[in-house]
Image (spheres, grey):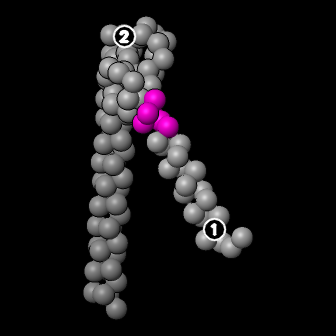
Amino acid sequence: MGRWSWFFLALIILLAGGAFTVLLLDQGSDSIIPATIQQVEEPQASTFLATPGQAEQLVLATGFILFNLIGMGATIALLMWLGERGIRKARAEGDSTG
């Protein structure tokens, strides 16, 4: 079989799997997230649902990460600005002396 034959065989297998998944999901599931199969209804055991405590932890962790990323970016920007200012000052002094 040629290179393209393997490609088309894999494509047909993927399309068949997708069709079977759509048929499975079309059996009247009323999940929160479309095109997913929800296995349990209990929020502590589900990957799609969250308890209030889990949601609070997610919001706090996301805020903490964003706050630290902004702080790191501001620190790096300040260091680059100070370094560039020092380089300009050194070049100006070098040009004036010689």
Q: Residue at x 61, y 59 (%)?
A: 9
Circle 2: element type? loop
Q: Earlier in the sequence, mark 1 or mark 2?
A: 1
For the N terminus, give its image quadrant. bottom right
Rendered position, 35 above or below 12? above
Residue 27 as seen in the image, left or right of residue 88: right
Which residue occupies 41% across, 29% down?
A: 25
| Magenta-colored stretch includes residue 63 | no
Q: Are marks 1 and 2 in contact (CB under 8 Å)?
A: no
Q: Which mark is residue 5?
A: 1
Q: What kind of secondary structure does the magenta stretch mostly adopt?
A: helix
Question: Residue 33's image quarter?
Answer: top left
**Badge number at residue 51:** 2
Q: Nearer the viewer, mark 1 or mark 2?
A: 1
The residue furthest bottom is 98
As drawn, 23 above or below 60: below
Residue 44 is left or right of residue 53, and the answer is right
Residue 62 visible, this angle = no
Horizontal and vertical percent for residue 75? 34, 48
Q: As rendered, which of 17 and 52 lies closer to the eye?
A: 17
